């Protein structure tokens, strides 16, 4: 009886949290729309049109080949699988070994089962270190990844000292960026291979906008079938995350920040944030987070700036914060 009560209480708390998230996101979307109309964003903007007709940034194509790193309970990969077309290929990975993962996240079993049945899932893997992607099985390394995603990376080391804790997470992220950039450079994704251009018919619940590419340089604009490979990292904003210097870490690994935007968790059906230690933070999804989009090439704007000024490829001072 007590268990039932606790479960009901937890369910009600989650429902309330979800309502709060939705309200916040509605506000964010309203603010986003206002900002967009001011900025006159181009048609290359990666936009996802959701089943409710709302448009939000989603830097994926329906047929993207995606490697998901450090996915806690696999709920993000499962959400992605439901959003992308059957022409997509998803490799879903977690850092924990199988036993540890199921112990920490009882809901993982259901997600894994669903992923294994999904037509757009290539593989589901445990014990994948984001800093050692070269250790992925050969058939996975051969996948022409166009997106590598790591949401809320965190070592969960519990180090109390703020500076050491930041350094610990920076070391992990730095290794990830190096490894991800290597995989994109050596993989077919970086070779600019053309992807299936036929878009799968939109699923009954979701429709995607036309193929979205981030780089607006001529080459890509003229060859919309070539999808520039991107690394997407979502991180909380505020203290101490703002001091992780995510853009600087990526830049040191040869990855350039193209843009960043608010991560709207409720847009991914069934996705629930997981803590590294397996615990839950009920109001976590209400806390603001940003997705940073990195590519192997400097942003088109930086290239244009260089041509005009004749200066070498440096970004604005302080932009790596
Ligand atoms: C805060 S949790 C976020 C989990 C999940 N991505 C989400 O959005 O709910 C941080 C995750 O990073 C993972 N992680 C830590 N170090 C890692 C590494 N070197 N490689 C891959 N994942 C790592 C942890 O196992 C944990 O699942």
Image: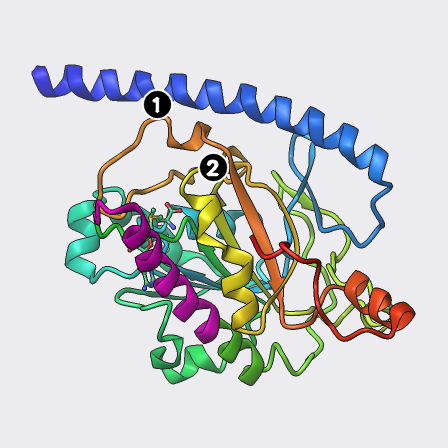
Q: How far apart are marks 2 and 1 (CA)?
A: 23 Å
Residue at which label 2 appears = 238
The answer to whether any part of residue 178 appears in the image is yes
In depth, the one of 286 and 202 nearer the eye is 286
Q: In this view, does 270 lie above or below 94?
A: above
Few, some or many residues within 10 Å of mark 1 (<14, 14–19, 20+)? some
- The quadrant holding residue 318 is bottom right
x 44%, y 23%: residue: 18
The x, y position of residue 317, in whole percent, is 67, 58
In depth, the one of 240 and 97 nearer the eye is 240
The x, y position of residue 33, in whole percent, is 75, 30
First along the sequence among labels 2 and 1: 1
The part of the chain drawn in magenta is: 158-179
Q: Relative to residue 236, is residue 208 drawn left or right? A: right
Q: Is residue 49 above or below residue 305?
A: above
The circle on residue 14 is 1
x 45%, y 31%: residue: 287
x 42%, y 40%: residue: 271
Few, some or many residues within 10 Å of mark 2 (<14, 14–19, 20+)? few
x 56%, y 52%: residue: 321
Q: Is residue 14 above or below residue 284?
A: above
In depth, the one of 159 and 67 nearer the eye is 159
Q: Relative to residue 123, is residue 301 drawn left or right? A: right
Q: State yes or no: residue 14 in magenta.
A: no
The circle on residue 194 is none
Dominant secondary structure, magenta: helix
Of badges 2 and 1, the one in the foreground is 2
Quadrant location of the N terminus in the rendered image: top left
The residue lying furthest to the right in this view is 308
Q: In this view, does 187 lie above or below 23?
A: below
Q: Report if the beta carbon of the residue with label 2 is closer than 8 angstroms to ligand 1.
A: no
Judged from the image, the secondary structure of the residue bearing numbered disc 2 is loop
């Amino acid at each position: 009886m007590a268990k039932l009560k606790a479960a009901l209480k937890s369910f009600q708390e989650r429902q309330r949290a979800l309502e709060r998230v939705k309200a916040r996101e509605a506000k964010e979307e309203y603010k986003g729309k206002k900002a967009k109309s001011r900025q006159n964003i181009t048609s290359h903007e990666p936009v996802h049109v959701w089943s409710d007709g709302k448009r939000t940034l989603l830097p994926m194509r329906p047929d993207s080949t995606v490697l998901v790193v450090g996915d806690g309970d696999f709920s993000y990969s499962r959400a992605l699988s439901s959003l992308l077309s059957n022409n997509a290929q998803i490799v879903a990975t977690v850092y924990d070994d199988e036993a540890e993962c199921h112990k920490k996240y009882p809901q993982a079993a259901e997600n894994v089962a669903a992923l294994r049945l999904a037509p757009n899932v290539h593989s589901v893997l445990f014990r994948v270190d984001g800093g050692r992607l070269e250790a992925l099985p050969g058939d996975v390394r051969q996948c022409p990844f166009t997106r590598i995603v790591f949401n809320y990376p965190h070592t969960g080391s519990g180090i109390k000292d703020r500076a050491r804790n930041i350094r610990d997470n920076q070391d992990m992220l730095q290794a990830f960026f190096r490894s991800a950039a290597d995989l994109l450079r050596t993989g077919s994704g970086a070779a600019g291979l053309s992807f299936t251009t036929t878009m799968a018919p939109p699923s009954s619940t979701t429709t995607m906008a036309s193929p979205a590419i981030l780089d607006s340089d001529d080459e890509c604009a003229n060859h919309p079938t070539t999808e520039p490979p991107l690394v997407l990292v979502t991180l909380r904003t505020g203290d101490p995350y703002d001091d992780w210097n995510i853009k600087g870490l990526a830049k040191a690994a040869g990855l350039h920040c193209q843009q960043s935007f608010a991560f709207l968790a409720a847009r991914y059906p069934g996705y629930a944030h997981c803590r590294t230690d397996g615990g839950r933070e009920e109001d976590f999804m209400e806390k603001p987070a940003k997705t940073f989009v990195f590519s192997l090439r400097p942003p088109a704007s930086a290239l244009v700036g260089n041509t005009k000024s004749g200066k070498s490829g440096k970004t604005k001072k302080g932009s790596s914060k």
